[in-house]
Image (spheres, rainbow, N blue to C red):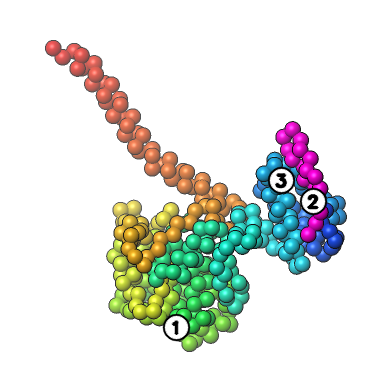
Amino acid sequence: MGVPSEPTIGIINLILRHLFSPPNNTRLGNLCGPTDQHLRSIEAALQVGIAHRHEQFKIDGKRESAQRAMEMLQALYEMADRPIEPATVQLMLAGDSSTDGADGAGLQTRRADLRPRTANQAIYLDAIGQHDITFGIGPAGTGKTYLAVACAVDALQRSSVQRIVLTRPAVEAGERLGFLPGDLSQKIDPYLRPLYDALYDLMGFDQVQKAFDRQAIEVAPLAFMRGRTLNNAFVILDEAQNTTPEQMKMFLTRIGFGAKAVVTGDVSQIDLPKTQLSGLIDAERILRRVRGVAICRLTSADVVRHPLVARIVDAYATQGAAIDAAPVAADEAIEEKFVARRAPLRKRAP
C-alpha cells in the first residue's frame, strides 16, 4: 500500500523513499505512534534514520537495515487501522514470525489468537501438540511458560482434556509449606503467580474463577503430587530447574491416560544448593532419546520482552562462561609454574 521510489545509494548508506497512498491520516498516525515513538524504536534498533512529511517517508542507513526498516513500515501500515502497541513493534524487531507470514499454528483462546513469535517458538508449540511430554528450556522472556499455559487453555476449551493442573517447586519456602499462613491455595499462590497471570490474560478473570470453582483448573505444590495419577489432564511443571532428580522422576510418572505434560525451566537460574543436581538438567540428559518426549531449547534470540532482556541474558551467559573457565585457566597456570620450577632441578641431577 504505497509507491516506492528509486533508492539513492551513497558511498556508505542507502536512502529509500516511500509514499503511502492513498494517504490516510489515521493510519499514518498509528504507524508513527505517539510523538513518533514507533519510528524512534525502529531507528534505535536498526541504526537507521527515518524522516517523514505527511505520507512521504525517507529512510537512511546501511542497505540491509534500511530495507528491513522499509519492510517494517509497510507491514505496520497494513495493520495501522487501529493503534499499534509498542510491544508489537518490539516483537517485529525481535523477529516476529506472526507478522511476516511465516507458518505457525495459532492457538485459539478466549482473549487472544496466539501465534509463535519466533522459529523456535513455532517448533516448541508443534512439539507440545505432537508429544505427550515436552520440555521447554530457555532463558527468561522466551515465552516458554506463557505458551505452555496457552496450549493448556486451548486444549481445555476444545475439550481435549478435562482439567489443567499447574505445579511448581516452592524452593524459596523449602517445600515446607505447612509453616506458611493460610490454606493450601494461599500458601502456594505466590509461587504460581506467573501461571495465574497467564491464565487471566488468556481467559479473563471471571472465566478463570469459574474454572477453579468447577475444578477444571487446579494448582498444587510439587511436593503434594506424590501418589497421584493425572488422567485426561494438561499438566504444567514450571521452574523445573529447581526440582531434584527424584522430584522430576516423581512428577513425570504421575502422567496418566489422555494426559499431556509440559515442563519448563531456565537452567541459568537454579536456586538449589550448589551440591544438588538439577532435575531438569538430569532429565534432559536421560530422556533426550526417549520416544514420545520432546526437548526444545529456546535462546536469547527468542526473548519477546523488552529488547534489553535479550542483551542481559547474553551478558550473564558470557559472564557465567568466563567464571566457569577461570578455575581451569588458574589450574593450568599453576601447573605451568610447577613444571617450570622443576625443570632446573632435573638439569642439576647427576
Question: What residue would you read off at disc 2?
Answer: 4
Q: Earlier in the sequence, mark 1 or mark 3?
A: 3
Tell me how far mark 2 sits from mark 1, CA to CA: 53 Å
Tell me the residue that label 1 is attached to. 162
Quadrant in the rendering for residue 289: bottom left
Q: Residue at x 68, y 45 (%)?
A: 65
**Residue at image coords 35%, 63%:** 243
Furthest residue in direction left, as rendered? 350
Badge count: 3
Q: Give percent across and percent down for residue 21.
A: 84, 59
For residue 60, which numbered disc appears in the image? none
Sequence-wise, the earlier of marks 3 and 2 is 2
Amino acid carrying label 1: it is Gln
Amino acid type of the residue that numbered disc 2 sits on in the rendered structure: Pro
Whether residue 246 is visible: yes
Q: Residue at x 49, y 53 (%)?
A: 299
Residue at disc 3, secondary structure: helix
Viewport quadrant of the C terminus: top left
Position of residue 54 measured from the top left corner of the image (x, y, whole percent): 86, 55
Mark 2 or mark 1: whose residue is earlier in sequence = 2
Locate residue 185: give its quadrant.
bottom left
Residues at marks 3 and 2, CA–CA distance in whole angstroms: 13 Å
* Residue 5 highlighted magenta (yes or no): yes
Span colored in magenta: 1-18
**Is residue 31 one of those drawn in magenta?**
no
- Residue 145 appearing in the image: no
Q: Indicate the position of residue 303 as horizontal and vertical percent values.
A: 55, 56
Comparing marks 1 and 3, which lies closer to the viewer?
3
